[in-house]
């Protein structure tokens, strides 16, 4: 088992430019069931064995795609996400970086109405090792196993996963939630799913400066999660008011600092790692690896 | 992107929000004629993106044009929180009967914009929020529907009993939202919103922060960018697809990915070193990017060692290594260099670097420690 | 019994200008339970014994008003309706004439979400004789009884009711749906309520040119309504393309003509009166008066 | 309010919808220079709010400016469906490869705007809808969210396989919606939307009907009103708070309430008479209104008798009677007059009228019959 995606999940790819086409291929190579592509003007063609459609609606109508991954450039991404959700997909993964925050806010209003979940935007996607990957994560470093990973970033997730895998701790599902100030699903949404997932035995929360999602997660874990959870927060050395790469990684107000987040996590009984190696050590303590 | 007061006020005025009819000038002599034009008394206000201007002496009242000239002369060139004042706003002075606060920002938790209002205006609103949160009224804004008149009125009638003042304030609130939405702001704030002694309501100060993600929609607003020297450097980095923030440490960092870049800074600090910067070169292995990134690092005089930390994911390590080699051929530096390379095609990548004379490590913590040690040695030499 | 309103219905009045104040008084005189008024700037005052508030939210919070009647001028009516609905009322009666059609369309989207029903706009309101009237109908001509009346107009409703009352046929509830192209509740919504109302024994549908609501009602009656229904359609002599007073009373396309409506009603087994006297005759046949 | 083609095209152009660069003129000589300016060949199109202009000879192709002059001369002054042509549009002729239809209107049943599109453009769309409804594609529009790009593309790719044409059409659809929303239209239509031989997409004709209820928001659009003579009379009535539509019968009607006014016309017709007009004086008993209403009725030469039908509801019958008396004192007419008065304070009202020499009836059908009989007598005299 795993959460949100598995090998049966029917995935379509929106935006078959350079990146979309490349990652469609990578996903297929990993085993993801890519059933359709969407690219206006490429309707009727085929790519890597899957049919391409002009519109998301047509793709869903013809292939019963249930999940869409968005590689469409930022100015057109809002429309693409709405197209996917209105066409009937129940999960949209937005890899696109740079979508205006207010537009994402509006999109989420509509997606909530439609009952469509959003991963991202500005997300590397998610992967259920050995089952399916939807997004741009490098499949090779992942290994099937008992650890759920929820992160706000990309390469840092790989770093964490790489060391977990090296230490023998595989992953049930690893998620890059996205680095923007407003994103679809957050820690608590994933935590709830991982709590109910039979394969998951422990969860790693990889947080960073900005916002207060980690604090919300801490409270949620204390209240609702029985499985062991380990935290890790980056950006301890970030100065206030400066955006550290991710649009969402900016300290505004006291709650956004790494120190505040670490404190709240620990106050709620969640051990917080100082380094990536430390994460592995904490997980090892929890799972007895 | 933060706008300065005079820019934000201009956007407010365009939306129909009443503000003093001020004039922005860059010299004392201009300040004198501006004071003549608007009529005295005037307030001369330093235009810098920093709080606490008043306490720092950046805001002065002038009774005559000549006084305005002297005040502007005193303020221009002044340094407030590391920023040199290059512009002042000459605003006609008004008679204030009360100071209020209204602001719109993004509520990350609720994932929507939210308006805040308070009868305790004119002071640091974060302090009000921390000390007496009950003094702040919150109004959620549906991003698709916007702030509606009835919602604004509900808040405005909590600030004012008087119908005229309440309705004027409600109207300003709706216009503040319209401005926020129109320019894709992440913050739009009026503090203080002043009640004048004649009963009228006026935006006495103005603050707008624009969403960088949305700047592609607002090319005309790009012209309002007035970067400080440090922002200039960050902006130049952005133009090359890099994300850079200068700090004051010794270890120059170059990392792929924002999260990993923060983790790299943290591990340096954790091990007793000091990171000189945040630098995310993103996912691409383009040598040009790496060249620009290296230029940024070597141009920082504080830097005593460079730590390059790359996790090859989709971008293969051999591609990254090739990019690095090309970049290092162009940028000559005596600074000690530590390269950490791991992930997809790690071995091929290390081979390429080793052929170039660089022994890359696969261990992030080890690499960071090595860089710290090299910096310490360099510092001692 | 009656539908939508009865003597216990807690009503607030939005817009206490000349018309709103006058009709508030009239409604109280009729027996309507007016619990609050809303008028920005008049908060804290009293009118005819009921408290006035600056905002709808305050009025509902303080008085538990469940129904609001809108007398606010057209440019501000959209906002007033939304204020009433968002404050928690479940029935809004919009007397205001001249609200732009697209604005009403948007309002209805939001009211549907909120679960608030809208009568009107451009409606004379509704009355449950002997119980409550919400709107501007002249109470004196109504009499409690077994006939439900659903109409698209005002004075014509009075004309019909006047003759029904004179002939001894009282009314359970009489509704002026409103004369605009887009209105909240329509024939079918009221028919369903009247069908389930114990007091109602027959229904008169007073229709006019424009749109196809009467046709929809015909189909609905045939399928769902067991009580006798009588129709009456005005505008037989109206030329196409001309707005006959009501914004919605304009023949565009074949379905909007009186002839088409009469035909469809008759095809669905609903007798259609030629004159107001004829309505009374048909009702008398049905109810054996 | 219906706009003429040249006005609608101007609004379309302002929204970025491509249209021919035509010029509206009111004389043949101007048509010649317009043709010179836009370049020949040109199409001279009568500007009247009526369908079937082409069949009526109101659209002519001209190969030279001189020919344009002759064509305009022929069309100007022409009568199309009772309307005298006072303006022509001189449009540069284009080479048409295909004709399509797009239009946005209000779906009263769904209570939302809806877009219709068809590959069968250039002909009467209502005929297409009646004969082959499957040829029309419907796209619902959420009034709060508007027509989104993905929705427009879904429809456009059903019209065109070609990417460029489909995307150009989708863009026009979104702009058509934006225009519709911006001006509060109840209809915005492009028929035909032309595919030119060079593959570009162009709005060849344009139709906009504005929502009268929304005109208060768009005072600048009020200036576009070009009423026909009969509309002029209706407009004048509107300015006095009356709702008036002229017909061609003999019984002038004055009624309070639109529904009752229609019922009054119907009863006249039902009883064998002919209504001369629809006239709703609304709920108010203002004598001024009644004066204007009487003026409208007596100015209609076809009118042989007047039937005033008032149901006193909230407006009391005595108030109405007083208004009537004041009005009748001002307007002297020999036309036979029947007054029906009933409702609140009926008796007081009748007394007032009877003191003035008018015996009002309480019976609508009886009143109508009496008016018909009087008209018949008057007609015979």
Image (tube, coloured by chain):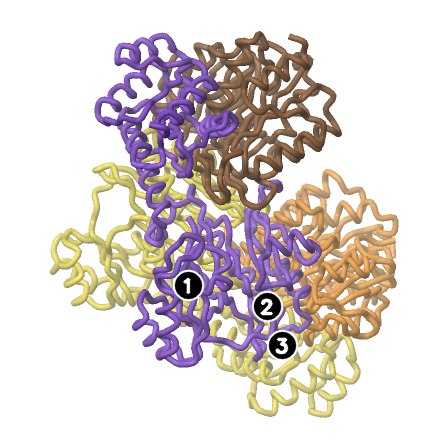
Chain colours: A brown, B purple, C orange, D yellow
On residue B99, which mark appears?
A: 2
Whole-percent x and y of residue D145?
52, 45
Residue position for label 1: B46
Labels 2 and 3 within one chain: no
Distance between mark 2 and mark 3 Cα atoms: 64 Å
Q: Is residue B68 above or below residue A152?
A: below
Q: Residue at x 64, y 17 (%)?
A: A282
Question: Which secondary structure lies at badge 2?
Answer: strand
Question: Which secondary structure lies at badge 1?
Answer: strand
Residue position for label 3: D307
Chain for numbered disc 2: B
**Answer yes or no: do the residues labelled 2 and 3 have beta carbons within 8 Å?**
no
Chain for numbered disc 3: D
Q: Residue at x 59, y 48 (%)?
A: B142
Where is residue A165, by image quadrant?
top right
Q: Is residue B183 above or below residue D264?
A: above
Q: Nearer the viewer, mark 1 or mark 2?
A: 1
Q: Nearer the viewer, mark 3 or mark 1?
A: 1
> Is C262 situated left or right of D57 in this image?
right
Labels 1 and 2 within one chain: yes
**Answer yes or no: do the residues labelled 1 and 2 have beta carbons within 8 Å?**
no
Distance between mark 1 and mark 2 Cα atoms: 20 Å
Q: Which of the two residues, D120 or D154, is positioned nearer the viewer here?
A: D154
Asked if one can make out residue C246 in the rendered structure from this viewpoint, the answer is no
């Amino acid at each position: 088992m795993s959460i949100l995606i598995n090998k049966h999940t029917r995935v379509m790819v929106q935006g078959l430019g350079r990146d979309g086409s490349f990652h469609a291929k990578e996903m297929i190579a990993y085993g993801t069931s890519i059933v359709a592509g969407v690219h206006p003007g490429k309707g009727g063609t085929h790519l890597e064995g899957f049919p391409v459609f002009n519109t998301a609606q047509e793709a869903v109508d013809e292939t019963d795609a249930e999940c869409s991954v968005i590689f469409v450039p930022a100015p057109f991404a809002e429309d693409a996400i709405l197209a996917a959700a209105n066409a009937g997909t129940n999960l949209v993964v937005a890899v696109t970086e740079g979508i205006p925050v207010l537009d994402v806010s509006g999109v989420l209003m509509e997606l909530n109405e439609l009952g469509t979940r959003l991963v991202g935007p500005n997300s590397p996607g998610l992967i259920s090792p050995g089952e399916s990957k939807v997004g741009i994560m490098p499949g090779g470093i992942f290994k099937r196993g008992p650890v759920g990973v929820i992160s706000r970033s990309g390469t840092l997730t790989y770093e964490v996963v790489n060391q977990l895998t090296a230490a023998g701790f595989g992953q049930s599902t690893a998620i890059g939630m996205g680095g923007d100030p407003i994103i679809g699903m957050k820690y608590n949404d994933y935590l709830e799913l991982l709590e109910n997932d039979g394969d998951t035995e422990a969860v790693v929360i990889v947080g960073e400066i900005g916002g207060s999602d980690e604090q919300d997660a801490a409270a949620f874990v204390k209240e609702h999660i029985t499985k062991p959870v380990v935290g890790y927060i980056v950006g301890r050395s970030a100065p206030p008011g400066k955006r550290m790469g991710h649009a969402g990684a900016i300290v505004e107000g006291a709650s956004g600092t790494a120190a505040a987040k670490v404190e709240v996590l620990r106050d709620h009984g969640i051990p917080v790692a100082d380094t990536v190696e430390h994460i592995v050590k904490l997980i090892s303590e929890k799972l007895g690896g | 992107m933060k706008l300065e007061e005079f820019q934000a006020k201009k956007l407010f005025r365009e939306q129909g929000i009443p503000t003093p009819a001020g004039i922005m000038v860059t010299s004392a002599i201009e300040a004198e004629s501006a004071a003549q034009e608007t009529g005295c008394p005037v307030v001369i206000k330093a235009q810098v993106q920093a709080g606490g201007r008043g306490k720092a002496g950046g805001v002065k009242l002038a009774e005559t044009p000549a006084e305005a000239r002297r005040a502007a002369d005193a303020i221009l060139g002044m340094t407030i929180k590391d920023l040199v004042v290059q512009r002042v706003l000459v605003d006609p002075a008004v008679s204030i009967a009360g100071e209020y606060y209204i602001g719109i920002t993004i509520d990350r938790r609720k994932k929507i914009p939210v308006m805040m209002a308070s009868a305790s205006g004119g002071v640091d609103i974060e302090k009000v929020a921390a000390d007496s949160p009950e003094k702040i009224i919150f109004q959620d804004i549906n991003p698709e529907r916007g702030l509606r008149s009835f919602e604004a009125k509900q808040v405005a009638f909590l600030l004012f009993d008087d119908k005229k003042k309440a309705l004027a304030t409600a109207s300003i609130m709706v216009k503040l939202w319209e401005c926020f939405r129109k320019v894709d702001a992440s913050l739009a704030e009026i503090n203080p919103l002043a009640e004048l002694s004649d009963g009228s309501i006026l935006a006495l100060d103005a603050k707008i922060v624009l969403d960088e993600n949305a700047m592609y929609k607002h090319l005309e607003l790009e012209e309002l960018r007035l970067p400080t020297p440090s922002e200039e450097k960050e902006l130049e980095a952005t133009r090359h697809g890099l994300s850079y923030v200068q700090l004051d440490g010794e270890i120059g960092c170059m990392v792929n990915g924002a999260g990993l870049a923060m983790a790299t800074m943290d591990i340096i600090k954790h091990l007793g070193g000091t990171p000189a910067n945040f630098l995310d070169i993103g996912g691409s292995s383009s040598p040009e990017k790496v060249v620009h990134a290296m230029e940024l690092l070597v141009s920082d005089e504080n830097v005593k060692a460079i730590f390059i930390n790359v996790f090859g994911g989709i971008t293969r390590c051999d591609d990254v290594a090739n990019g690095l080699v090309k970049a290092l051929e162009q940028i000559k530096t005596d600074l000690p260099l530590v390269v950490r390379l791991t992930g997809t095609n790690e071995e091929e990548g290390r081979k390429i670097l080793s052929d170039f004379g660089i022994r890359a490590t696969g261990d992030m913590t080890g690499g960071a420690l090595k860089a710290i040690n090299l910096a310490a040695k360099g510092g001692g030499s």
